[in-house]
Image (spheres, rainbow, N blue to C red):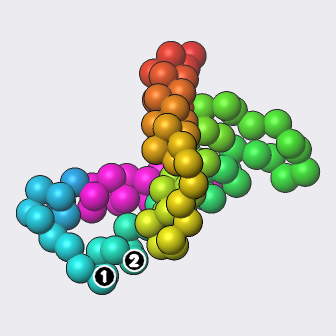
């Protein structure tokens, strides 16, 4: 069930991000909703990929989860560090490539 929840939250985040960008929707609600949805999707995907008590996880899902959580945190806070864009870009590329080449 958690896998489905993570994927549903990820899908909702992707659809809403696209709709808001396409129709130039912005404001306090979107500035709060999308980051919270990203964090929730990242946490749900991370939790579903880890059996209770096990530390192993799929690298692609782990990187995607970290990317979503970081994107949400950066959007909700004033947290900024040197190389932030590079870190998130590398995470996105690595997660995407691993997801594409997953068996």
Residue 59, above or below 14: above
Please name the predominant secondary structure of the magenta segment in the image: helix
Could you tell me residue 11's position as x and y percent? 37, 52
Could you tell me residue 5's position as x and y percent? 53, 59
Nearest to the observer: residue 100 or residue 20: 20
Q: Quadrant of residue 64?
A: top right
Q: Residue at x 50, y 16 (%)?
A: 101
Q: Residues within 10 Å of mark 2 (few under 14, many from 20)?
A: few
Q: Residue at x 62, y 59 (%)?
A: 43
Total marks in image: 2
Location of the N terminus by quadrant is bottom right
User: Horizontal placement of 100 versus 70: left or right?
Assistant: left
User: Horizontal placement of 64 versus 29: left or right?
Assistant: right
Residue corresponding to mark 1: 29
User: Horizontal placement of 79 versus 17: left or right?
Assistant: right
Q: Residue at x 29, y 74 (%)?
A: 30
User: Horizontal placement of 34 versus 47: left or right?
Assistant: left
Residue corresponding to mark 2: 32
Could you tell me residue 34's position as x and y percent? 38, 67
Write down the region rendered in magenta. 1-17
Q: Are marks 2 and 1 in contact (CB under 8 Å)?
A: yes
Label 2 element class? helix
């Amino acid at each position: 069930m958690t896998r489905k929840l993570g994927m549903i939250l990820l899908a909702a985040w992707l659809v809403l991000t696209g709709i808001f960008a396409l129709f130039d929707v912005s404001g306090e609600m979107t500035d709060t909703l999308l980051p919270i949805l990203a964090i929730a999707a990242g946490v749900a995907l991370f939790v579903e990929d880890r059996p209770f008590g096990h530390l192993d996880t799929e690298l692609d899902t782990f990187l995607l989860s970290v990317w979503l959580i970081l994107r949400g945190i950066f959007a909700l806070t004033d947290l900024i560090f040197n190389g932030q864009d590079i870190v998130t870009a590398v995470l996105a590329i690595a997660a995407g490539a691993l997801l594409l080449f997953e068996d």
